[in-house]
Amino acid sequence: MYRQIRSNRSPRAVRVLPVVQGGRPISLAIPSLDQAVAHGLRQTPFRGEMGETRLIDGRIILAGLGPAEQVNVATWRRAAAAVLRCAFSNRLSALRWIDPAAVSDRLSAPDAAAVIAAAVNLANFDFSDFRSKVAAVRQDPPLDLDLAIDGDKKITDALRDSLLVGKSVDIARRLAATPPNVANPAYMARFCRDLARKTTGLRCSIIDQAKARQLKMGGLLAVGSGGSTPPVMIVLEYQGRASSPAQRSNQKSKIKNQKSPPILLVGKAVTFDTGGYSLKPGGGKTMKYDKCGGCAVIAAMVAAAQLKLPQRLVALVPCVENMIDSASYRVDDIVTFINGVTCEVTNTDAEGRLILADALAYGSKRYQPRIVVDLATLTGGITVALGPFCAGLFANDDKLADQFINAGQSSGDRLWRMPLWNELRDMMKGSHADLINASEKRWAHSGQGAGFLSYFVGENAPSQMPTLPWAHLDIAAVANTESDSVELAKGPTGFGVRLLIDWLRANA
Ligand code: BES
Ligand code: MN
Ligand code: ZN
């Protein structure tokens, strides 16, 4: 894997030449390269099938795009990932793609450039923070990759922006991969403070355990009570750039912009989920990725600030370690959330919704958001329902749902909409307390989670299904992958970062 991908031009870059199925590579207008391609093709024909690659003469990579009439975002993505693999296995350190418009106009060239950069980033993931320098086990030092795409300024801008988002995806992935003995709630808080200090426009504050007690965040406190470090709620804020240059220079509208209702992003960050006293069966499974919703939200805030997106954003990341300890919460405990709603704990492994409840209720009241979006590795049930191909989208608003489905297509962080019915809310009603956190019924586990969260969103909560536009993304199946594929390096995926940024950019 490459350590870093930069948008540099390098004179010795290997040319990347996409080819549609059955088509001929276009001329590079450099006789020696064109001859090398012609010679290479005479030796072995290149069919141009999607994902097919060939390195010729150490100077040109042919990349198959598949049938010309089917070229789309997914094709470019696949081709770019395949090129990355080909480049890395040949230890190449600089690539220069020809202008995508010269090959296909089925996608705008800047969009194609953005997708290429995104795919190259996604297929590449190096996490060497915990590799030692001990000679006997040391690996080859990773290379950096220079990535260039020919074309006008729109293309170079798209490439640069996409690599910038890619860096944020990698922030999410590195944080997600950081092991639970290091990335505990205290570390997460420190990490975000440092990140905000380094990122212009991003502010961070921490609601620590003492403050959470004052605020009566009973869910966060209960789940976090057995952790190796106390629970925290991380708050990140980005004011948003005033939308037009005229507005930017106008002081009044600047103030208005600061006070405009923000978009609230909430991300579950359980740094390790043992299940608590409802211990996970089988044990010993990876659970450091239970913080991936939070990691995605944190990283998206960085990208939003760096891209100077227009929207005002507030992110809340409730952060706990779900452990077993004499101080841990138990089954049968009754907790009271910040909005006064009570819940009988029927399963300490349904902990995500308990910490999200406080975040959603606190955020709804404190910031009066205009839209709420939460990302959480909430249920194993979503994997059963949808497999590892997409995340589950629960939304109370069709317009918002459509926006997310579209952003899922463009970003590659795919979504499938799930129902959000009142029956699911009813399943979460309690007898000794207002709610239970898990029903004995074994059906619709993911929907139960969404139904539970709906009691904490917006002004009219908990009395009815919220009317404030809200999207809940259950990312349990897509937060990490168990093996390498062409398109995705094994490990954390950073799912949600590109999705959120594409959604914000498309709906500014
Ligand atoms: N973090 C898990 C969900 C999960 C499971 C994520 C596997 C990734 C892989 C969550 O806290 C959980 O344990 N959910 C329970 C809910 C149930 C007890 C109602 C589940 O899905 O089994
Ligand atoms: Mn759990
Ligand atoms: Zn969990």
Image (spheres, rainbow, N blue to C red):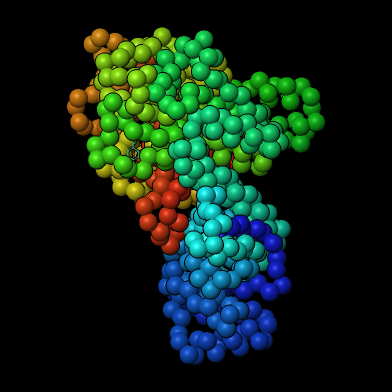
Looking at the picture, how far across and down is residue 396, in whole percent?
Answer: 39, 28
Residue name at image x 36 percent, y 43 percent? 286
Residue closest to the eye, 503 or 219? 219
Residue closest to the eye, 12 or 452? 12
Residue name at image x 54 percent, y 54 percent? 132
Residue 408 appears in the rendering: no
Looking at the picture, how far across and down is residue 430, in whole percent?
Answer: 26, 14
185 versus 52 height, above or below: above
Q: Quadrant of the C terminus?
A: top right
Residue closest to the eye, 436 or 264? 436
Residue 477 appears in the rendering: yes
Residue closest to the eye, 290 or 315? 290
Residue name at image x 50 percent, y 29 percent? 185
Residue name at image x 56 percent, y 71 percent? 91
Looking at the picture, how far across and down is residue 448, in whole percent?
Answer: 29, 27
Number of numbered discs on residues: 0
Answer with left or right where residue 196 lies relative to residue 22: right
Looking at the picture, how far across and down is residue 402, in whole percent?
Answer: 44, 39
Residue 490 occupies which quadrant of the picture? bottom left
Answer with left or right where residue 391 lies relative to residue 141: left
97 versus 321 height, above or below: below
Q: Which residue, as the protein is rendered here, is positioned at the far left?
A: 441
